[in-house]
Amino acid sequence: MSAIDRWKRISRERIRDVTRRLEGFSGRLGIWNITDHNQQVGFASCGAWHERLRFKRLYLESENTKRSFRFVTSFKLESELMRETERLGLVVLNGSEGTSSLKSHILRIPRFVSLVVDLPDTIEEYFSNLPTNRRRQVRQAIDRGYRVEYNRETIFCREFVQAYNLPTVQNSHGEEGIITKETELIKLLRESDTEIMKVLKGDKCILAGICINTGDAYQLYKVGWLNGDTRWVKEGAHTFHIWQAIIRARELGLSILDLGGTPPFLDDGVFNYKMRWNARLNTKRRTLGEHCLLMNPGHPAVQSFFQRHSMIVYDSANRIYFCSGHRPSNLKLCKGILDGISGWWRLASPQEAKDRGLDKEPSNGMPSGWFAPEPLDDL
């Protein structure tokens, strides 16, 4: 990629960043309505761009959407939000709305969760306990002849952002991606126990990652592959990167590998990929923000959303649960993930809710009585 192309890409990202900030501010003054192109399905939002983009993809399943904004005075906001919830099924709130009088009606979903790997005394023991397909992937990555280098050179930070992280985030996550700032990386390298890991094929660096020694864990903070080319992922460079991080953690005397922020949705490819390293849910690290949702549980679009997506949520007591339209026996979860949750909530169908006399009002620490507890004992 030429220097001009990189400059254009960075300029576009800076413009988007300003637009995102303005949108987040405007969401505090009124309501955005986001609908699919045919205006058949939609949701309302008082949140920032993170919320709009993520739920455009997950709730509407469409990139071709329309947006409209209307100002709403503060004394009318609550009634308008409840009206939109009934009409559209979903309202995505700014996090600050979670402290309002609507608090008991809000479903809280972490934006990201932390998955970590507990490392035994020897690498051989860890490797032998991995799933068969993951052991095969590690062997294949090693056989490709990659090698790894570590350094703390701040001069590489600009190249990391421009040639690795930025194109990778844009190619993998599109508008939802959050680009790392060069100044942030320089500060990390100067002020904390941070290093750069480079995965090389011959003399070419095909993948680079920012790794932090937090004192009890080796954290994979940021990563990117050269020019965002997914060929390097398909050829095992990312698998090699994680495998080398495991080795590095043990070299440094650490017993935990932190795989970094992970989307909280079970069907998400990133969640599943990290889970298959025999990861567990880190219940102590909850600093990655959250989505606050108002929902009409009987709305067809909400019912469909929970049938497609099983997700980690917080109840009113801040306990971690899985929430789904399915029973836990219908889904595949590793023991380390199940051990990190307090239980399982299943969203009942309208017919089941009617048959069981379930109420839409908040119940049992959840925003609706339609969330029925499911046993985990048989798993």
Image (tube, rainbow, N blue to C red):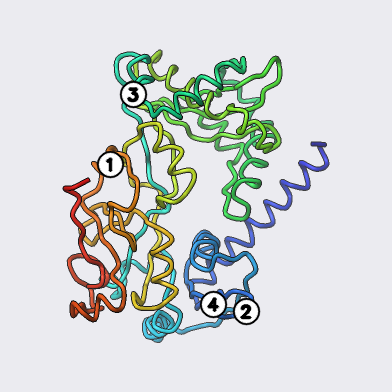
Q: Position of residue 264 (x, y in %)?
A: 40, 50
Residue that label 4 marks? 33
Dot 2 or dot 3: first in sequence order is: 2
Q: Is residue 70 left or right of residue 335?
A: right
Q: CA distance from mark 4 to mark 2?
A: 13 Å
Quarter placement of the C terminus:
top left
Q: Residue at x 37, y 73 (%)?
A: 295
Q: CA distance from mark 2 to mark 3?
A: 50 Å
Kind of element beneath mark 2: loop
Residue type for callout 1: Lys
Residue that label 1 marks? 284
Tell which of 187 and 126 is nearer to you. 126
Dot 1 or dot 4: first in sequence order is: 4
Q: Residue at x 41, y 59 (%)?
A: 309
Mark 4 vs mark 3: in front: 3
Q: CA distance from mark 4 to mark 3?
A: 48 Å
Q: Is residue 122 left or right of residue 209?
A: left
Q: Position of residue 344 (x, y in %)?
A: 24, 56
Q: CA distance from mark 1 to mark 3?
A: 25 Å
